[in-house]
Image (spheres, coloured by chain):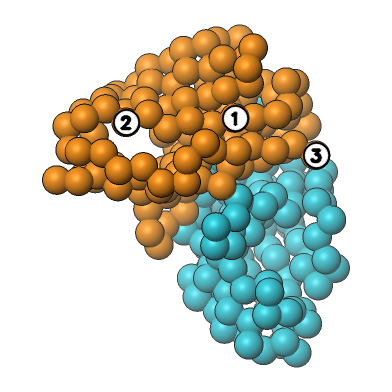
Chain colours: A cyan, B orange
Amino acid sequence: ETGVTQTPRHLVMGMTNKKSLKCEQHLGHNAMYWYKQSAKKPLELMFVYNFKEQTENNSVPSRFSPECPNSSHLFLHLHTLQPEDSALYLCASSHLAGSSYEQYFGPGTRLTVT
Amino acid sequence: GESVGLHLPTLSVQEGDNSIINCAYSNSASDYFIWYKQESGKGPQFIIDIRSNMDKRQGQRVTVLLNKTVKHLSLQIAATQPGDSAVYFCAERNTGNQFYFGTGTSLTVIP
């Protein structure tokens, strides 16, 4: 257990569906992240929230919409996805200052778009 | 953009031998580096980190070396064990708190 939980662990959705991924951290961190992990590709940073403010959107399509209501919770809202969006979506959290910027990762949500 | 690359996608070692996994990074302004281990079905797990003002850091059975001159990072695992079999990623952090990961090296430990 890393202190970062993600739900659901597995999700199968059609291209016309709307779903949300949830992430929660119990570590007192003030930064949260969404990553996409596809086979044989580096982890792709999607969104960064520092102190609940979005600071990065790495050219992510608008069909992915993040939400960070507080420093402990992070959501990724999904709508009209494409089959190439199938991947493992990882949430992470970290401190923004101090001796370590170590990111703690959740177990991920395995998303399949049909 | 930034790029982080690994020299070899796979590595096989005999149990008890030492393992060395290499990583190249491109952004000389990156100030912090991390090595992660990822086992099947799990998220990446922190192994060791190093700041750019250091060139070596040791943990339990692991050592990270940073060569800023050639922008190279390596992870050394001493007395490799079967439980070390996993994919290993390096990552660099820029001053904007953005992390960029390498593709990963798959380490297989042969009993």
Q: What element does badge 3 sit on?
A: loop
The relative height of residue A101 versus residue B69 in the rendered view (above or below) is below
As measured in the structure, the alpha-carbon distance from the residue carrying label 3 to the one carrying label 2 is 30 Å
**Residue at 38% of width from left, 17% of height from top?**
B58
The quarter of the picture where residue A14 lies is bottom right
Residue type indicated by callout 3: Gly
Give the labeled residue for mark 2. B19
Marked residue nearer the N-terminal end (1 or 3) = 3
Q: Position of residue A31 (x, y in %)?
A: 67, 41
> Left or right: where does residue A56 sit relative to residue A95?
right
Kind of residue at disc 2: Ser
Q: Quadrant of the N terminus of chain B?
A: top right
- In this rendered view, identify the residue nearer to me: B104 or B44: B104
From the viewer's side, name the closer residue of A61 and B66: B66
Residue highlighted by disc 3: B1
For mark 2, give the secondary structure.
Answer: strand
Q: Quadrant of residue B12?
A: top left
- Which quadrant of the figure contains the C terminus of chain B? top left
| Numbered disc 1: secondary structure | strand
Q: Amino acid at mark 1?
A: Ala
Q: Estimate the spatial distance between the alpha carbons at disc 1 and disc 2, rounded to whole Å.
A: 17 Å
**How many residues crowd mark 2 within 10 Å: few (<14), some (14–19), many (20+)?**
many
Where residue B91 sits: x, y (%)? 58, 36
Residue on which disc 1 sits: B24
Q: Earlier in the sequence, mark 1 or mark 2?
A: 2
Q: Local crowd at mark 1 within 10 Å, few (<14), some, or many (≥20)?
A: many
Would you place residue A79 above or below residue A51 in this image?
below
Quadrant in the picture for residue A76: bottom right
